[in-house]
Image: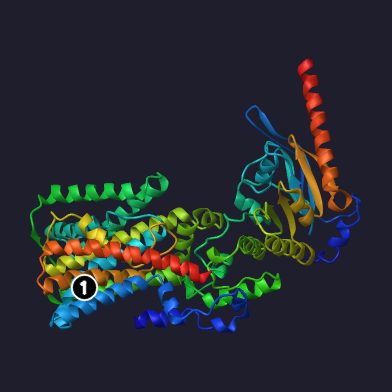
Amino acid sequence: MAQATVASEGSSPDAPARPDRAGQGRAPSSLLVRLVQRREATVVIVTLGVVIYFALRTSTFYSVANLITMAQYTSSIAIIGSGEVLLLVLAEIDLSAGQMYLTAPWIVYLLWADGVPVGWAIVAALACSLAVGLINGFVTVWLGVSSLIVTLGTNYALFGLVLVESNAIQQNMPGTTGEFGILFGVGSWSVGLWALGIGIAIWVLLTRTRFGTHVTATGGNTLAAAEAGIPVRRVKVWCFMIIAVAAGMSGILDSIRIASLNPGNSGLDIVLPGIVAAVIGGTALTGGRGTVLGTLIGAIFLGVLEDGFNLIGVSANWFFLVEGVVILLAMAVNTQLGSLAARTRR
Amino acid sequence: MTTTGDSPGATSPATDGEAEDIILSTEGITKRFGAVVALRGVDMHLRRGEVLGLVGDNGAGKSTFVKIVTGFQRQDAGRIFVEREEVDFHSVTDARRAGIETVYQDLALVPQLTVYENLFLNRELTGLGRLGWLSRPKMRRLATEYLHDIRVSVPDIDAEVELLSGGQRQAIAVARATRQNAKILLLDEPLAAMGAKESTLIIDLVKDLSVNRGVSMIVIDHNYTHLFELCDRINVIQEGRVTVDTRVADTSIEELTELMVAEYRRQVREGQALLRA
C-alpha cells in the first residue's frame, strides 16, 4: 500500500502549481481516488488481502524459509509475466514462452552430455531461445499470422521436439555445484533475485528508454508509429526475442535449482500464470498499456496463493478453484475501478 | 523565414506574375489507374505562408493529387517544384525531407502517450550515450516552450493524449509537424466534427503559423464554411484538373457553388456531344 501511495503522489508533485489544470474544472482528487486511479491498485489490494489472510491462519508464513519458498514459486511467473507485458502492450501474446522455459534447460543438458561446459551450454541455449523468439516475431510480423496462433504452434513444435529427443524421461540437470550453482539457482534467494533483476530491467526498458516509448507507440497506434518512422516490425520482433530469452533463462535457473529436468511437463501450464499475473496486474489485453510493477505484484499474488494453500494444508485441487475465482473477481474489480478512474480523470 | 514579413503582403494583392515567393508548384500532373484517368494535368501553386483550400467531389482527383504531392504515389507525367527546385518523390520520406508533411487528426498521435511524448515521437531526446535513456525533463521543457510559442494551450503536458479533446489533438499533431521543420502542411478536414470553441483553436493556430511562421498549408475539405474560415485562396478540382482558382476575399460560397455547377454542366454537355459523335 505504501508503495502505491508514494508512487501516486510522486507522479504529480506539482499539480497545484499548474493553473491550467484547475482551469479544466478538475476536482482536487483525494488520496483514495488517486490510489485507485493507478493501474496497480487492484492487484495491490488483493495481494495484501491474501497475505493478511495467510499470515493470520499460519504461524510460519513470515519465516525465512517460507519467504524463500514463495520467492521460488514467484520467480518464473514474474519473469515470464514481465516479458508478456512487452507483448501485451504491443497487442500481441506469446504462448510459447512456457515451452521455451522447458526447452532451454533441455538444450543445456544435451550440450553438456556432449561434453560442452555448462556455462557455454547455457549461452548456446539462450541463443536458441533468441532464435525461437525471432521465428515467432518473423512469422507474426512478416507473414501476418496472429501471434496467438503462431506461438501456440511454436509451443507444440518445441514440446514435440523435446519429447522426441527425451522420450519424456526425467534427467539430472548439470551445473548445480559450487558457486556457479549458487549463482544460477541453487542459492536460497538466487531465482528470486534473478526475477527481480529481469523484472526491473524490463520495467526500465519499457518506461525509461526510447525503445520502450516505441513499444507503447507501436501498440497504441501502429499506423501513427509507422508514420513517425518507428520501425514497428523490428520493435515487435525484438520483444518476441526478449521474452523468449527471459523465459529460457528462467527455465534454466529453475532446473538448476531443483537439479532436474522434466521434459514431460506442459509449457502452457507455465506461461498462463505469467499472462494472468500481467493481466491482474493491470496490463490491458488490447494493447498500448502495461505495467511491469503490477505484473511483479501479480506474480507475488499467485506465489503467495500457492504457498499459502500448501501451508494451511488445503488440497492442491482446491488451489485451482480458488485461483480461478480470484482471477475472475480481480478482473471484475479491475474493470470497474478502471472505468471509475476514467470518469474521475475527465 | 526571411520572407515572413512580406509574405502576407505578397498574398493580399490579387495579382499574379509579380516576384512571388512560390514554395510549392505543380505542372501538368497526370495520373491514370488502368482505364481511369484520375488527373489530367494539374497546375497548382502555393505561396509561402499561404493557406490554400482544395475542394472537389469524391473521385474528382483531390486525394490522388494529395497522395502524389506527399510521396505516397508517383505521377505518370508532370513536374513538382519545391522552392522552385524540381523534386522527384519516390516515398513519403522523400516528401518529408523536402518539408512536406500530412497531418491527420486521429491517425497521427498515440493516445496512450503523453502530450510531450507525442510531440517527440521517434525524435525522443536521450542521454547516456547509445543506451536510449529518455531525457524526460528536457523533452517536457522544450515541449512546453514550443506549445507556448505557437500559442497552443493544453491542460497538462503530462496528460495522455487520449484525455484531450479532438481540437487539442489536432493542434498537437500540427505542432509536431511544424516543430519537425515541416514547411508545407497538408491538413485533411482539420475542423471535422468540432464544436465552435474547438474550431477556433485550430483556426487561430493555422493563422498564427501562416502569418508569424511562414508555414504554408493546403487544407483539404468538403465543407465550404470551414474552408472560407481557414483559407486565403481556394482551388476547385473537377474531373482531374483545377477548374477554379480564386482568393477567398474575392468570392463567396454561393459564387463558388455556381462556378462548380457551371463547370459540371459544361462537362456533361461535352460528354453528350462525344457520345453523339
Q: Position of residue A141 (x, y in %)?
A: 41, 49
Mark 1: secondary structure: helix
Q: Callout 1 environment at 10 Å: few (<14), some (14 to 19), or many (20+)?
A: many
Q: Nearer the viewer, residue B160 or A340?
A: A340
For residue A253, which quarter of the picture? bottom left
Residue A81 at x, y = what percent?
30, 64
- Which residue is drawn at the image coordinates 40% and 44% (left, top)? A143
Quadrant that contains the N terminus of chain A: bottom left
Above or below residue A184? Residue B94 is: above
Residue B81: x and y in percent read 75, 48
Inspect the image, locate mark 1, and give the three-letter code of the amino acid beneath it.
Val
Q: Left or right? Give the position of B42 relative to B100.
A: right
Residue ID at (16%, 83%): A64
**To which chain does the residue with label 1 belong?**
A
Is residue A142 rendered to the left or right of residue A162?
right
Q: How many marks?
A: 1
| Residue that numbered label 1 is attached to | A304
A69 left or right, relative to A27: left
- Residue plotted at (47% across, 58% down): A218
